[in-house]
Amino acid sequence: MADKPFKKIDIILIVACVLFASIGLYLILGGYHFDENWKLMKVARVSNESSTPDKFAVLDMPDGVKQGSKLKDDVVTPTDDKAMSDDMSALKQTNQSTKRPTVSDSGGGRLVAIDAGHQLRGNSVQEPVGPGASQTKAKVTSGTRGVSTRVPEYQLNLDISLKLRDELTARGYKVYMVRETNEVNLSNKQRAEMARDAGADILVRIHANGSENSNESGTLTISPTAKNPYVRHLYKDSRSLSGNILSELTKVTKSINKGVWETDTMSGINWSSIPVTIVEMGFMSNAAEDRLMQTAEYQEKLVTGIANGVDSYYADRD
Ligand SMILES: [Zn+2]
């Protein structure tokens, strides 16, 4: 018949069209596209940039599957558009419900010890202020108390320390907590030794201040002096840790920067065997600052500021 060869060509053309359309559809749904040099590219989401979840990176994947395994660890490859949009709405929901912590990898697995200052009941039994010292000090005191809120310092210190633990963990640090409850009996010497025994890299001691002058307010950090008889070798790093935390903290809180206080009178510093700082977040003897430190918003600033300071200490040291 005259039209028979046409039918064969028709079938071949239809099959070819369907095949071509299927390949096209597969590539589009898979997120592939051709760049200006007709190179096959794949659009994929970079998972470790969760602070900017809307960012997409274009990855050059000329060999497709072969490179896929190499990229698996750091790249999430959406299988289709629906999976991608589900993923995005999940991210949006997470962002709405929890503003903090900021997820990043600035910590690089370093171990940070946090000592929430004081405890429910002080212990007036004496201990030497440093290794081999004849001078002694109470093992630990119960700290100050909010002049307006009546919140005890040990409670504020613990609240901030627990939030700081979460923030540092989210930034890729490992965290060792000297205490996670107020019902402990740990001297300042013991606290320093616990941080050392945990193998921590630095010790951050969280405190709040008290003054007879109710107008006094602001933030300071405490470091040993360059001539400290016990931890002179830790001076440079402790001073840098104190300076970095103070400047980053006051940048976020906008509180008065009262400087780094260098002193050799702190047993918790003198007994340390790793770089150490005391953060005096603010004055509980100042009614306004006391009330401010009990707000969730300001506590978030304190935590962000201290964590930024730890980040910047390591950025300086590396
Ligand atoms: Zn204190």
Image (cartoon, rainbow, N blue to C red):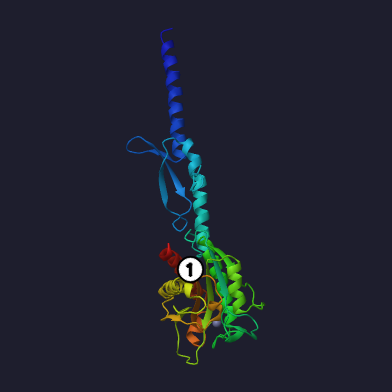
Which residue is at a point 47% across and 35% down the rendered structure image?
26
Residue 24 appears left or right of 136: left
Residue at the extreme top: 1
Q: Dividing the image into 4 quarters, which one contains the C terminus?
A: bottom left
Which residue is at a point 42% across and 52% down the rendered structure image?
55
Task: Point out the quarter of the image occupied by ligand 1.
Answer: bottom right
Sort mark 1 into few (<14), some (14-19) or many (20+) by Cα contacts within 10 Å: many
Instruction: Tally the numbered discs.
Output: 1
Q: Is residue 253 visible?
A: yes
Q: Is residue 301 visible?
A: no
Residue 129 appears left or right of 258: right
Q: SS for tag 1?
A: helix
User: 289 or 271, which is in the foreground?
Assistant: 271
Q: Which residue is mark 1?
A: 307
Residue 19 appears left or right of 116: left
Residue 75 pos. (x, y %): 48, 47
The quarter holding residue 244 reads bottom left
Disc 1 Cβ-to-ligand 1 distance below 8 Å: no
Q: Is residue 110 above or below residue 151?
A: above
User: 232 or 62, which is in the foreground?
Assistant: 232
Residue 248 pos. (x, y %): 42, 72
Residue at the extreme bottom: 212
The quarter holding residue 137 reads bottom right
Q: Dividing the image into 4 quarters, which one contains the N terminus?
A: top left
| Type of amino acid under label 1 | Ala
Q: Is residue 206 above or below residue 55?
A: below
Residue 280 pos. (x, y %): 49, 80
Residue at the extreme left: 36
Q: Is residue 284 above or below residue 179?
A: below
Residue 122 pos. (x, y %): 64, 84
